[in-house]
Amino acid sequence: MNDEPVRVLIVDDHEVLASSLAQALDIEPDLQVVGRAGSLSAAEAMITSTMPDVLLLDHRLPDGDGVGAIPRLRALRPRMAVVVLTASTAEHVLVSAIESGASGFVSKTRGLPELVSAVRAAAAGEAVVSPEMLSRLLPRLQRQRNRGNGHQALTEREREVLSLVAEGLTNAAIAERLVVSVHTVRNHVANLSAKLGASSKLEALAIAVREGLLPDS
């Protein structure tokens, strides 16, 4: 088991928020803030130098749209999970974040404990989105569906796991539902994500919905 703390890079141009968030994260023994950036250009430089496990990314930055930059930022460190900090609950923003490979999003109006929990969840490979929000966004993904057959076929069990991801269940909850270990579920998620060319559980779900791989989709 890896006992190293989760390395977090905060990208937000609001100094007070970034400072408060850094303090809240650094208090936790399993988390370590490795830097703060106030722009996308600074974030790009710091990703390569600090090698974060989780990127907390503001939606609006002085030099561009954080959500739109996710693919570029993740290309610098593919293993990095991205959690979008947003003041907006506009569905098109959240859908864009999912389709860009984000692990999820947290509203800036939420308390610091929720943001800390979001970092831990993203580092563990979980989708950082409530089941209620996910059910609201799935129809938006479905309307943008563009069926394709360029991916490896999913197994029956992988499709079953994907359906449970669509319900907003965590890996632990999926393991309990299927009566298997969490490790087994993680392997299924990793395999189906690789087959779909996805970098997060949410992106895998977006691709699956677009391509009609889920029941009733």
Image (cartoon, rainbow, N blue to C red):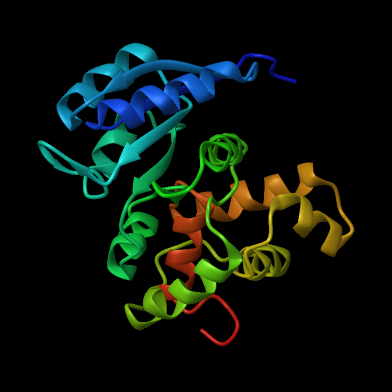
Residue 210 location, x and y as percent? 40, 74
Image quadrant in which you'd find residue 123 = top right
Residue 22 location, x and y as percent? 43, 22
Q: Residue at x 49, y 48 (%)?
A: 200
Residue 162 location, x and y as percent? 62, 65
Residue toward you, 95 or 60: 60
Left or right side of 88 for 192: right
Residue 213 vertical placement versus 179 (above, below)? below
Residue 139 vertical placement versus 81 (above, below)? below
Q: Residue at x 76, y 59 (%)?
A: 174
Residue 148 location, x and y as percent? 38, 74
Q: Residue at x 30, y 67 (%)?
A: 90
Q: Which residue, as the protein is rendered here, is positioned at the far right?
A: 179
Left or right side of 65 for 19: right
Image quadrant in which you'd find residue 1 = top right
Left or right side of 196 for 64: left
Residue toward you, 21 or 129: 21
